[in-house]
Image: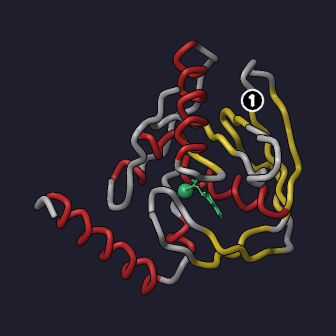
Amino acid sequence: MSTREIIILPDHRLKLVSAPVPEISRDVRKLVEDMFDTMYEAPGIGLAAIQIAVPTRVVTVDISRENEPRNPLAFINPRITWASEEMSCYQEGCLSIPEYYEEVERPARVRVSYRDLDFVEREIECDGLLATCIQHEIDHLNGVLFIDHLSKLKRDRVTKKFIKQARHREQGH
Ligand code: GNR
Ligand code: NI
């Protein structure tokens, strides 16, 4: 088991556009394994590789509840191929913006094409929390955070708070 450090706002690497995975290698398998370890330890229901400072298009998700068996899902090079016109609103959080939660409106249903751990092309259609989570993770791959969907006022307010916290940590508080 190896967990890796999750980078947090205002780390500028969170704005990077991640690069596609060209093929499955030992490094990619190890990355996915470490992402699951890190995600379950956090705990979170999703993780994008850039959150552990790896700018690669890999996402892990598990929306199972605590009293249910684990359902680890890995998405390599995921992309949204269809989104419903119907929207839905969820209270979102992000491991890279700890302890901040806000409602975000996104398409209620999406179809996502991706490659699995054998690099086989697959497609899923999802709704509910899974649809929200996958969209949140694909945003990360494009350098987009859920606060980018909020008003500039709210975004600036939370960003300033995290800049201030980072400054305090640097000073050893
Ligand atoms: O753990 C997480 N919970 C969550 C809740 C609502 C919408 C999206 C998420 S993803 C988040 C983990 C994370 O930061 N993934 O990038
Ligand atoms: Ni996130």
Give the class, few, some or many, for how many residues have Cα within 10 Å of label 1's Cα (few <14, many ≥20). many
At which x and y percent is residue 164? 23, 72
Residue farthest to the bottom, as pictured = 153
Image coords of residue 146 (percent x, y): 55, 66
Q: Look at the picture and state if 37 lies above or below 142.
A: above
Q: Amino acid at mark 1?
A: Arg
Query: In the picture provided, is 125 more to the left or to the right than 148?
Result: right
Q: Residue at x 69, y 45 (%)?
A: 61
Residue 80 picture location, percent across and down: 75, 50
| 12 versus 152 height, above or below | above
Q: How is the image coloured?
A: secondary structure
Q: Is mark 1 within 8 Å of ligand 1?
A: no
Up-down relation of residue 63 to residue 54 (above or below)? below
| Residue on which the image places disc 1 | 115
Circle count: 1
The part of the image, by quadrant, that contains residue 124 is top right
Residue 133 position within the rendered picture, expressed as x and y whole percent measured from the top left: 69, 57
- Report the quarter where the C terminus lies: bottom left
User: In the image, what residue occupies the spot 24% across and 63% down?
Assistant: 166
Q: Which residue occupies 42% across, 53% down?
A: 15
* Res 104 quadrant in image: bottom right
Q: Quarter for ligand 2?
A: bottom right
User: Residue at 75% across / 27% down in the picture?
Assistant: 116
Q: What kind of element bears circle 1? A: strand
Is the residue 88 above or below the residue 125 in the image?
below
Q: Residue furthest front?
A: 67
Q: Residue furthest left?
A: 171
Which of these two is toward me, 43 or 13?
43
